[in-house]
Amino acid sequence: MSRDLSSLINHLIDRRQTLRTLVASTVCWTIDPTLDLFAKNPPRKILFFSKSSGFEHSAIRRNASELSPAEKVVIDLGKTHGFDVVATKDGSLFTRQNLKGFDAIFFYTTGDLTQAIGDKNPPMTIEGKVALLEAMRSGRGFLGTHSATDTFHSPGPEFETQSMERRDPYIQMIGGEFIRHGPQQEATMRLVSPHFPGVEKLGAEFKIKDEWYSLKNFAPDLHVILVQATQGMEGTDYQRPDYPATWARKNGKGRVFYTSMGHREDVWTNPIFQSVLLGGIAWAVGNVKATIPPNISEVTPKADTIPPKPTKP
């Protein structure tokens, strides 16, 4: 058999397997329009904030006045399931008075949001950041996707763990911090909290293609929901034991939910991701209860292992 013919056959086999996987995902995973995580409660209001003071992801990039792909998805989920969404990139909205009007704050952000850099949208004030953290401690919900952990970095070397008192207050609140990422790839998410809202039917694990963050500075009280299974992943950033990828925690009276998923635009339309996200939203706004004891030391006992620092060429 010629090399060209063999390559063609292998390509067709790979494509056929990919199509089977996509079809299976579509059949097995559809968001139930009657999902009652929100139906029995008054409409909740969420502020979806996507200012980029660093790298701007395509999932949150607006085309002139057109909303970004992620904004459209969250707003559509709200319309379907019964919660209201205000989407903004304007950091000046972060005042004590304004935040009182929301049940939860949702971040897909990068960088120091008090700086007028990156996407050039108005930054937060220092007082606005304080107001955000106060709102979280007093009982508001917080949601973060993907680069929400690449926001308000702690001082110190990126390939070192910072002590709790050295971590930025925002990082202390969200519960983890971005180090680096490797190439986009399909990776395994291992479910370790099967009773958390939105993940009950996921099974023991699932695979999804995304850009995966290598993380550090985990809060010791994390309730880990999904674990990044690193075995077989490509890149030095994943030469480390398994670590948390999706979690929940209490912050004072507030509820914090984070998932590292969400870099790719197609992830936002993936029904598995949407199910995870809806469960997180419902819990963060207080519509559903969940038992979230700290489990990070049991399910990811070596999570604080830092991957090797890449050598300069």
Image: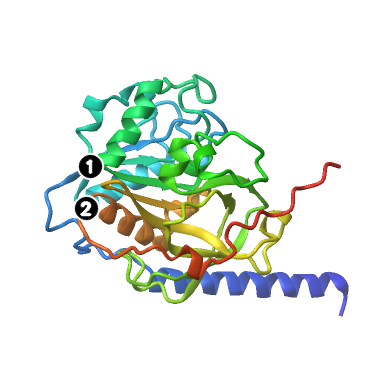
Q: Which mark is residue 103?
A: 1
Residue shown at 67%/64% (left/top)?
Answer: 233
Mark 2 touches mark 1? (CB < 8 Å): yes
Which residue is at the front of the view, 275 or 73?
275
Asked if residue 95 can be seen in this view, the reply is yes
Q: Residue at x 62, y 45 (%)?
A: 179
Coloring scheme of the render?
A: rainbow
Element at label 2: loop
Query: Residue 80, position in %: x, y?
Result: 23, 53
Q: Position of residue 300 (x, y in %)?
A: 53, 66
How far apart marks 2 and 1 lie (CA) works out to 8 Å
- Residue sitting at x 20%, y 64%: 34
Q: Which mark is residue 286?
A: 2
Evaluate whether residue 87 shows in this view: no
User: How crowded is the residue under tag 2: few (<14 C-alpha within 10 Å), some, or many (20+)?
Assistant: many
Please state if 238 lies on the left or on the right of 269 as rendered.
Answer: right
Viewer-side residue, 111 vs 10: 111
Nearer-N-terminus badge (2/1): 1
Name the one closer to the observer, 267 or 170.
Answer: 170
Residue plotted at (12% across, 58% down): 40
Badge 2 amino acid? Gly
